[in-house]
Image (cartoon, rainbow, N blue to C red):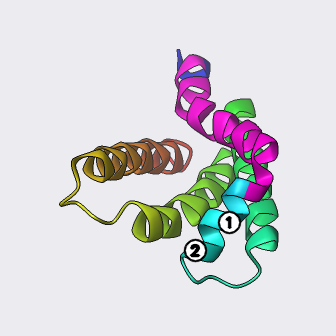
Amino acid sequence: MNRIARVLLCLVFINAVIGKFAGFTDTADAIAAKGLPMAAALVVGSMLLMAAGSALVISGWRSRLGAALLLIFLIPTTLLFHGNAGDAAERIQLLKNLSIMAGLLFVIEQDNA
């Protein structure tokens, strides 16, 4: 069950890596529109964090590190792109991300025991 939970937790990140790869320019443009510098480098960095973090969490090897990498990606992304809780669609994304953060914290805590 633990392995299934880890895969399910990481599906959103795996899907995001594929989406960012397929829509690299659109993703970089969205990042640049937020006023962030080096948008293309940030896209590559986010893809690396999500891919490496997911691989570590799913494999169970150094999964605490993997969960931390995913949190390093997810926290600023949530604040920058889904912080408008007044917008219903953004509120759903915000709550989804907070739920995923909780799952990642469980991975960190479980693997610390």
Residue 75 lies left or right of residue 19; in this view the side is left
Q: Residue at x 62, y 69 (%)?
A: 31
Quarter of the image holding residue 58? top right
In percent of width and height, residue 87 lies at: 23, 55
Main secondary structure of the magenta stretch: helix
* Number of on-image labels: 2
Question: Does residue 102 appear to the left or right of 47 in the view shown?
Answer: left
Q: Is residue 5 magenta?
A: yes
Which residue has dot 1 on it? Answer: 29
Q: Is residue 38 above or below residue 96?
A: below
Q: Quick check: is 58 in the magenta stretch?
A: no
Q: Secondary structure at mark 1?
A: helix
Marks 1,2: beta carbons within 8 A:
yes
Q: Nearer the viewer, residue 104 or 19?
A: 19
Q: CA distance from mark 1 to mark 2?
A: 6 Å
- The three-letter code of the residue at mark 2 reads Ala
Residue occupying image coordinates x 60% and y 61%: 73
Q: Which mark is residue 92?
A: none
Rate crowding at label 1 as few (under 14), some (14 to 19) or many (20 or more) other CA atoms within 10 Å: some
Q: Nearer the viewer, residue 31 or 72?
A: 31
Circle 2 Cα neighbour tier, 10 Å, few/some/many (<14 / 14–19 / ≥20): few
Task: Provide the residue span drawn in magenta.
Answer: 4-25
Q: Nearer the viewer, residue 20 or 57?
A: 20
The spot of residue 96 in percent (x, y) is 36, 42
Q: Residue 2: percent from the left, percent from the top?
A: 55, 22
Outermost residue toward the left? Answer: 86
**Residue 49: image location, x then y, percent:** 73, 57
User: Image point 49% across, 47% down: which residue?
Assistant: 104
Q: In the drawing, what numbered circle is on residue 33?
A: 2
Q: Amino acid at mark 1?
A: Asp
Say which element carries label 2: helix
